[in-house]
Image (tube, rainbow, N blue to C red):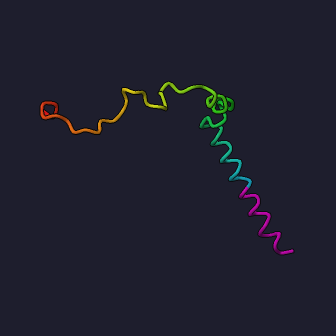
Amino acid sequence: MEILYILIPVSLILVTIAIVLFGWAIKNGQYDDLEGPGHSILFDDDDDMIPGPDDKPRNKPLAKSEQE
């Protein structure tokens, strides 16, 4: 029965921490846009993921005129 003297204050402290963290999250805008991240995966990126023929890396060394 004496364990209740420890468990009740500990549970009240944990509930208080949870409420404070929830209020902090609301204040900082964590719940402003709930649907945006779910829809953003459906949109195409502007950058090409596959490099085109002109995007190939140069494997041969530069000529002396190009190095200067």
Q: Position of residue 16 (x, y in %)?
A: 71, 52
User: In the displayed structure, would residue 1 be above or below residue 27?
Assistant: below
Q: Quadrant of residue 22?
A: top right
Relative side of 11 to 36, left or right: right
Work out which quarter of the rendered image holds the C terminus and state it.
top left
Residue in the foreground of this view, choosing between 62 and 15: 62
Q: Residue at image x 60%, y 25%?
A: 43
Q: Residue at image x 63%, y 37%?
A: 30
Query: Magenta region: which residues?
Result: 1-14
Q: Position of residue 15 (x, y in %)?
A: 74, 54
Relative side of 27 to 62, left or right: right
Quick one: which residue is furthest to the bottom in this view? 2
Q: Position of residue 29 (x, y in %)?
A: 61, 34
Q: Residue at image x 76%, y 63%?
A: 9
Q: How many labels sit on residues?
A: 0
Q: Quadrant of residue 38?
A: top right
Relative side of 2 to 52, left or right: right
Residue in the foreground of this view, choosing between 44 and 20: 44
Magenta stretch encompasses residue 3: yes
Magenta-drawn stretch, dominant element (helix, strand or loop): helix
User: In the displayed structure, would residue 9 be above or below residue 31?
Assistant: below
Magenta stretch encompasses residue 5: yes
Q: Position of residue 25 (x, y in %)?
A: 64, 41
User: In the displayed structure, would residue 37 be above or below residue 2?
Assistant: above
User: In the displayed structure, would residue 49 be above or below residue 8?
Assistant: above
Q: Residue at image x 68%, y 53%?
A: 17
Residue in the foreground of this view, choosing between 48 and 18: 48
Work out which quarter of the rendered image holds the N terminus and state it.
bottom right
Residue in the foreground of this view, choosing between 56 and 42: 56
